[in-house]
Image (cartoon, helix red, strand yellow):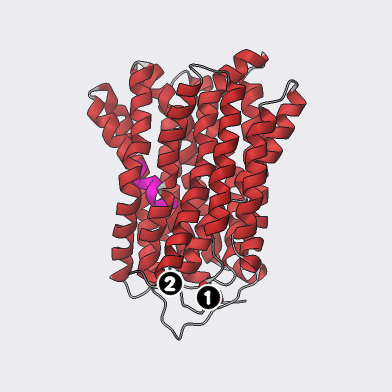
Amino acid sequence: MLKPDQKLGIQVIASAWLAVFCLFGYRATFSVLLDPMQEDLGWTVGQVSLGYSLMMTIYALTAFGSGVIIDRWGPRPAYAIGAVFGALGFFLTSQVQTYPAYLASYAIFAGIGTGMLWVSSTVSVRKWFVGPNYARMWGWAFMGAPVSQVILSLGVENILSTVDWRAAMQVLSLVILGALILATLLSKKDPENYGIQPGGQPKAASATTWTIKQAFSSFAIWGAILAFFFSLVGEFLIWTQVIMFWVREIGLPLRTATGLYVLIGLSGIVLMPLMGIFADRIVARQDKEARGRKIMLIIAPLSGVLACLLLFSTRVSLIGGAISAILFTIYWAIEPGGVAGYAGSIFGRASLGKIWGLSTLICMGLGPALGTFMGGFLYDFSGTYLFSILFALFSFLLSAIFAILLPLSAKKS
């Protein structure tokens, strides 16, 4: 029989899982929908892709607002806004006939909808689970990302075999609406509102409040931002270019290259919770939680460095490509939640929403766009993906360097 606090904790994880599922559903399905949209509407790939780029910009701007919301009222309003705007993003886009209407519907509505999901999910889990309990719980919640990557991308591909992209988007709008309504109903405010303490925190612990100015006057938050930013540059370069690297540079058939890419999602279903358990064990052995989170933030980008190196071994054997995909999954399983966990260990839970919301705005507003652009630019400039992969490798290495420099505490100015 579960205790009341355990039941509430499970609901927090379930609501975050659904939010992450919907957020990454947008990312996973765009690449599948891109080609049929471009052919039907007669626009260039660049024109259609601009909608996604603008969506990510609106997403980053909205993230800060979602952080303020969760600090004041909990994740429920953010998930509810995400349900409405996320569903409208797909549905209204399915009705467009003109390019300005496409940019408005996809970029604005989808941007606001998805921007309400990332900070809300990560911070809500952190507010409920601290110390050597956070990472494994976030691992279960973050498992929604690879599940979405596999199920929704393959599901949309199958739908497109019988109907057009407009009908596929209408189905996706219903999926988003239903999943986020359920997430809204399951979500919970801070544990103190229910007369309990967050998992792993002593009863006598008290909440520490930080202002934005105080937090951003410390190297701790800027070190975390730089570590996360450079990892995102490498990550999004790989996500957007790795299939074409395997096809054009290595000479693999498109189906084989796609299979290696899907392996990232499939292995993530297993590795997300396992890496969470591993991270919490590292934390439990340290004198400070921040030290354990810092160690994991060093391991994550170094996994990315090794994965980039092993990409080239695909010339010799597909085993090298498969190991590389799994290493990218290990990076993915650690970094996004790990950097939020480090921020939480430094600044506490009371003000984490707005602090991490503004950090997300900075990182997501710049990192994905830079990584995606450099991957394509360096290939167009040189005619080879060698320099693109090396650029990603160097970005992961910079992330590891800033992680090494992270302090274990911060003082209010």
Magenta span has 3?
Answer: no
- Observer-nearest of 383 and 206: 206
Number of marks in the rendered image: 2
Q: Secondary structure at mark 2?
A: helix
Q: Which residue is mark 1?
A: 194
Q: Which is the main secondary structure of the residues drawn in magenta?
A: helix
Percent x, y for residue 357? 61, 57
Q: Is residue 260 left or right of residue 80?
A: left
State how far apart marks 1 and 2 are (Cα).
Answer: 8 Å
Whether residue 225 is visible, yes or no, is: no
- Residue 87, image quadrant: top right
Magenta span has 330?
Answer: yes
Mark 2 burial class by Cα count in 10 Å: few <14, some 14-19, many 20+: some
Q: Which residue is mark 2?
A: 5
Percent x, y for residue 157? 47, 23
**Residue at horizontal 56 percent and vertical 57 percent from the top:** 185
Position of the N terminus, as image quadrant, is: bottom left
- Residue 171, image quadrant: top right
Amino acid, disc 2: Asp
Q: Most extreme residue toward the bottom, as rendered?
A: 204
Q: Which residues are magenta?
A: 329-335
Mark 1 burial class by Cα count in 10 Å: few <14, some 14-19, many 20+: few
- Observer-nearest of 279 and 224: 279
Q: Is residue 223 above or below residue 382?
A: below
Q: Is residue 210 above or below residue 323?
A: below
**Residue at horizontal 38 percent and vertical 37 percent from the top:** 265
Say which label, 1 or 2, has the lower sequence index: 2
Q: Marks 2 and 1: in contact by CB < 8 Å? A: yes
